[in-house]
Image (cartoon, rainbow, N blue to C red):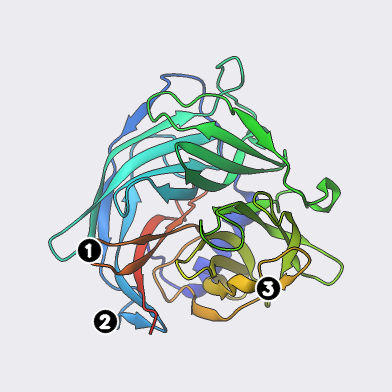
Amino acid sequence: MILSGRCARRTLFACVLACASPAIAAPGTPVETAEISARPIGQFHIGRDETRFGPLEFVGGLEMTSPARDFGALSAFRFLKPGSDFIGVADTGFWFFGTITHDADRRPSGVSNFRMQQMVDASGRPIDRKWEVDAEGLAVRDGIATVGFERDQRVAQFKIDPDNMKAPVRQLDYQVPAEELRQNRGFETVTHANAYGQHAGGLIVVSERSLDEAGNVYAAIIEGPHKGVFTVRRDGDFDVTDGAFLPDGDLLLLERSFSIARGVKMRLRRIYGESVEKGAVADGPVLMEADMGYQIDNMEGLDVWTRDDGALMVSLISDDNHSILQRNLYLEFILHQD
């Protein structure tokens, strides 16, 4: 829903981000299927037909709604099949699975086979306390999902089974001193480095806004031959919400900014791969920035994949905080390398 009057939209968005506290659904059916209605988004810049935004070319998007009470709060996702089957986590403590469909022109056209399952404890009981299951970051590889949790700060690994997600099989050492992780500002990015790069496919984590004394964002290499803490230079008032490595070894970060005066913004930033190193301050250029004049919302999830024609794709999702004032969006771009 596009609200009329930017001032009204900004004020309403402020109330949502400040006050949203969605409830966790009571235990029920282990896997809940949901019908998703998807309205196509043909313009990224509202009211304009341009498709190129710096090196990014807008392909299309979806505004997703569902009558299912647990649908929403989508905070991170990864494709299990490029541009098609996906797994994700909601910050209300749910797993979600589904498939993005595309039309004959390769534009996203809908979401099928969508289902959700509440996260469970070691005894298989659903976890109802949000502070224990505030899932924000997600990486997948070889049938294992690695999830970053805020509030109860931890990085945990799970075996992927879309029909029966169970308790974690292990907890990982996230390297950053626990006292440096701020409440509700923990690991938003969990991603695997390139398999043939200097970190040999190891896991990298980046916090949302846990800052060191210099004002830079805490991050860490938690697997591979060069484990250790590094930071990402904080540029302006943007916070990190997700990230994924590009084929050339650079790290693409999704960032978000919010103020009552201007509303919400999103930004994509390319962090030089060679600066992702123990003890370093990683940095890189902004590729694209968008405000509320564009089809954005509370953008929280990102994945990078390669289309069957060789195009390098970037997909984004938003977290609606289970609010009628926000939207669940899926956006798709080509990242041009020229």
- Classify 10 Å Cα crowding around label 1: few (below 14), some (14-19), many (20 and above): some
At label 3, the amino acid type is: Asp
In the picture, measured across the screen, residue 318 lies left or right of residue 284, that is left
At label 2, the amino acid type is: Asp
Tally of numbered discs: 3
Q: Quadrant of the C terminus?
A: bottom left
Mark 1 lies on a secondary structure that is: loop
For this rendering, which residue is in front, 225 or 227? 225
Which residue lies under the disc numbered 2? 49
Q: Quadrant of the N terminus?
A: bottom left
Q: CA distance from mark 2 to mark 1?
A: 15 Å
Instruction: Provide residue 286's location: percent of width, then percent of height.
Output: 55, 80
For this rendering, which residue is in front, 271 or 200? 200
Which residue lies under the disc numbered 3? 237
Which residue in the rendered view is the most extreme toward the left?
Answer: 104
Q: CA distance from mark 3 to mark 2?
A: 29 Å
Q: Earlier in the sequence, mark 2 or mark 1?
A: 2
State yes or no: discs 2 and 1 in contact (Cβ < 8 Å): no
Which residue lies under the disc numbered 1? 107
Q: Is residue 270 visible?
A: yes
Q: CA distance from mark 3 to mark 1?
A: 33 Å
